[in-house]
Amino acid sequence: MPDSLEELWRRIDSGLADEQEKIDTAVRSGESKQERYIPLLVRLLDDEASQVRYYALQSLVLDLRQKDSFMEARCWQLLKEDPGEEVRGMAAACLGSIYLNKRSAHVFRQLLGELEGMSQSPVVKASIYTSLFKLAGRPPMEWPGLKGPARVFDEGDIDWEKIAWLQDQMTVP
């Protein structure tokens, strides 16, 4: 496998890179903290492999801190349309990061609609649920799933009274 990140990107551009090389390239690009990789990572959001899309999205939003309107729109699109549940879950987590402490009633309603709807899997709903707490500006110690032993999320884990309380804390649009 090529050592340099530039060589990995050349392999991707020439169509020679396999899925693992693309994943490694996305991860290393995010870890580099170099903004020059942003347009290249954006292209990987359309890759056929869901794991490549997952790591490209993670690198863009969580590592390189791309939280502009373009990434916001792409995250919503991926949350609603991507066939991979892990990609949709990462999109929900990224929206939580983008909207951290924003307290937008409009965004809360959008995320709540995805949480209440039937189209998302429990894996994705777990990310959406946590993102609602982030949006509301709640401290990490209150975020669901951080306390106690790790376990699979179940929709019965949703505290709907707490969600209603959080929604009351939102500001107008």
Image: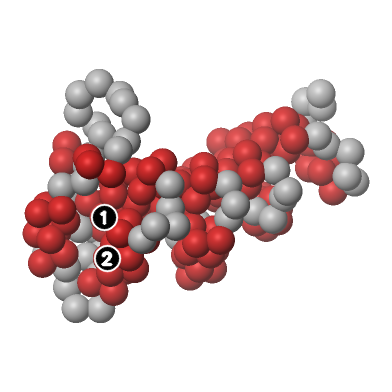
Residue 57 image offset from top left, x and y in percent: 56, 49
Q: Determine whether, in the image, residue 159 is placed left or right of residue 37.
A: left
Local secondary structure at mark 2: helix
Q: Identify the residue at image location x=28%, y=44%.
A: 155
Along the polypeptide, which appears first: circle 1 or circle 2?
2
Badge number at residue 132: 1
Residue 49 image offset from top left, x and y in percent: 70, 43
Query: Foreground residue, 121 or 47?
Result: 121
Q: Identify the residue at image location x=47%, y=46%.
A: 90
Q: Is 146 above or below relative to 67?
A: above
Q: Is 81 above or below relative to 85?
A: below
Within the image, what quadrant is residue 135 found in?
Answer: bottom left
Residue 112 image offset from top left, x and y in percent: 29, 62
Q: Is 149 above or below relative to 170?
A: above
Q: Identify the residue at image location x=30%, y=38%.
A: 154
The reply to whether the C-beta atoms of the residues labelled 1 and 2 are less than 8 Å apart is: yes
